[in-house]
Image: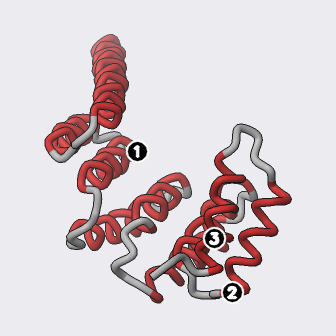
Amino acid sequence: MGLTVADCYYLKAKAAANDYCGDWNEVCEALNYALSYDDAHCASLCLLGEIYAKHLAMPENAFACFDRVIAIDAHYVEVYPVYIKYLIWNANTVKAKTVLDFAKTLAASDMAELYGLQAHIAEVKGKYKTSLKHLKTAKLHCYNDYFFDVIEGEQERIQKKLKLDKKRSKQKISKKKKK
């Protein structure tokens, strides 16, 4: 069993997209070839969704790509973290939570990443303590030092926000007492 033509073109597109500046001509050409050989190639559709969301500011097109991947293969776990991240960035935390809850039920899901995203949802809602709890759980599911360090950085950042939030609350209380 070898790589399909669609796999080869997807890998070319992914490599070109990961370069510092990105060779967008090569990305587009390779991605179009990959999808012309297999219009249901999940990895290519996922990359196309990322390009729509991140580089072209077309979230609805991105979400259509991600939904199509899930319709083709609900067990293609690579789509969920990307989809959830862009849902959060698009302020759709309700759908992000729904997608996240489903992704957690899949055996091959990266639980550390999913709990990190759950922490991000809580942070966006201003629930910093809940966010810190999810990050602690993410650390328990983390199996490499790099991501562990990333999670610790997130914890430090959210703790700073928590302190700022407490200061702001104290200032509001003191203003009310002065009135």
Q: Quadrant of residue 106?
A: bottom left
* Picture residue at 48% right of the left edge, 64% below the top: 83
Q: Nearer the viewer, mark 2 or mark 3?
A: 3
Q: Is residue 169 visible?
A: no
Q: Is residue 55 above or below residue 13?
A: above
Q: Mark 3: which amino acid?
A: Cys
In percent of width and height, residue 37 lies at 69, 87
* Picture residue at 47% right of the left edge, 55% below the top: 85
Q: Mark 2: which amino acid?
A: Tyr
Element assignment for label 2 = helix
Q: Residue furthest front?
A: 1
Q: Which label number is shown at residue 64?
A: none
Q: Which residue is mark 3?
A: 8
Among numbered discs 2 and 3, the one appearing first in the sequence:
3
Q: Which residue is mark 2?
A: 37
3D distance between C-alphas at marks 1 and 3: 38 Å
Q: Which residue is mark 1?
A: 124
Q: Residues within 10 Å of mark 3 (few under 14, many from 20)?
A: some
Among numbered discs 1 and 2, the one appearing first in the sequence:
2
Q: Residues within 10 Å of mark 2 (few under 14, many from 20)?
A: some
In percent of width and height, residue 70 lies at 44, 81
3D distance between C-alphas at marks 1 and 2: 40 Å
